[in-house]
Amino acid sequence: MTALSAYVGRWVALAGDEVAGVGFTGLEALHMARQNRYKARLTVQYVDDPGGERLALSPLLNRLRPLLAQSSQPVYLVGGAVRDALLGRYTNDLDFVLPQGAIKLAFQIGNALGEPAYVLDRERDTGRVVLPGQETYLDFARFRGPDLLADLRERDFSINALALPATAVSRAAVIDPCGGQRDLQDGRIRLVNDHALQDDPVRALRAVRLATSLHFALAADTEMAVQQAAGLLATVSVERIRDELIKMLATAAPDQAVRQMATLGLLPVVLPEIAALADVAQSQPHHEPVLAHTISVLRWLVLVEACLGEERPSGPELAAAQKMLAPFAEALRAHLARAVDGGLDGRVLLRWGALFHDVGKKETQTVEADGRVRFLGHDKAGEQIAAARLRRLHLSSKAAKFVGRIVYGHMRPLLLANTKRRVSRRAVFRFYRDTGAAGLDICLLALADHLAMYDGVGDEAAWERLLGVTAVLLRNYFEEHDKTVAPVALVDGRILLKELNLRPGPEVGRLLRLIQEAQAAGDVTTAAEAIALARQSRQK
């Protein structure tokens, strides 16, 4: 760097250790160098200010800079990684652009790192390096136009139309032709050009996601453009819509994302079943229509999830919930953090469940003579609606089925709490028999559902009963699993066939399930008792 200190803030093209060209862009430096040393093998790099304010860049770039410094093309880090660095945080998903040879560079970097590289789009010269252990992608693409500035001006939002020479580390090196840094300071999401949403309508959803995750506001003209472009989302692949929705649900404020989608007219296009809940009225103790209640449930669910951490909950109404959840917090965190087919995790599945938990109320609503609004069977109807929509969004069948189970069982803890009786072992068994591991999600959702219903604890006696029921359900799952959730079988089908002189068929399965439930309830404790129960219960 000492030898290049005279060129701080500019690009240099090097023939070995000799400076062959200098420019304010990498292409300028290369052009000059080729005039001077047209036969030499050239590398090009940016000369950063060693005393400049350092950005919060991914530590992964420390490994990449020596490799990128050997490139014969100027390479730039672009988009979200630069944005986040300016906000004082970093991401490991890195996007790079260069004038040409992007696929070639991707494979060179992959080989140097010992990691796989792939061609993403040969026509557009785009490649990717995958770092599996870190769940990290390095994407390399050719400029979208003749130069870097043209590339940046074709991006979505000003805060993403930012670039940094790939070997630079200082704030002074940031390239910002569209005023992105000012918008970052002002907390504003602003489209870069008038045709951005027509070029890619999914950017309308991305605007909502960025505003939600960054706690920014949409610029007035961008908000209007998003509303006008809502119908264009019908032309976008469901996979891209799905991916944006998943990212929204994973933010710290999924409720705000859903509310803003509704306000901007995006929700009826991407999730019409949820949008249809806006005018579905409910009786007391509910104080909101179904869509507004659903959004409130998402808000409270984030706070319930926070109870699984070590910090004190944000409101006093959650102190009792945190105390009840404390013995199971570590196990529940692991449950929510588990990987699920399709690049999801358990937390996102829970939030999908919260989003769809009342989706069946639209088609099951009835109004009685006294004005009471009821939704008999909305849980079963909702299970089918949710699973169908998630399959259309191309979530994995396993994920869609799991969310359906959450929706189907979301009323169970509330109903158990309303009985005002002790939760029996048989009731625990039946709960998990019907819901499986989704029962854990249902316990958390039930707490959020109650809090949203009353906009807080509300009926303190009902809240205490629900906390008690939830504690019983969680304790049995984590501490008594082999006794009440999935008892170790006392007999198997072969024994029943022999002892009862049965033929193979569905009757054997029915008797085994009957024995398992009796065993979970504590009514059967030995193989002899199990056989006696089967003999007594055998259908003639």
Image: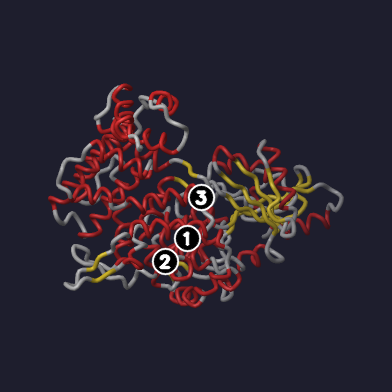
Asked if marks 3 and 1 touch (Cβ < 8 Å), the reply is no
Q: Amino acid at mark 3?
A: Ser
Q: Position of residue 486 (x, y in %)?
A: 35, 33
Q: Position of residue 147 (x, y in %)?
A: 69, 64
Q: Amino acid at mark 2?
A: Glu
Secondary element type, mark 2: helix
Which image quarter holds the C terminus?
Answer: top left
Q: Which residue is mark 3?
A: 397
Asked if marks 2 and 3 touch (Cβ < 8 Å), the reply is no
Q: Position of residue 409 (x, y in %)?
A: 33, 50
Q: Which residue is mark 1?
A: 389
What residue appears at the point 57 percent right and 71 percent down from the top-left corner?
A: 196
| Marks 2/3: CA–CA distance | 19 Å
Specify whether 413 is left or right of 148: left
Q: Which residue is mark 2?
A: 273
The extreme front residue here reads 540
Judge whether residue 57 can be spotted in this image. no
The residue closer to the viewer here, 308 or 100, is: 308
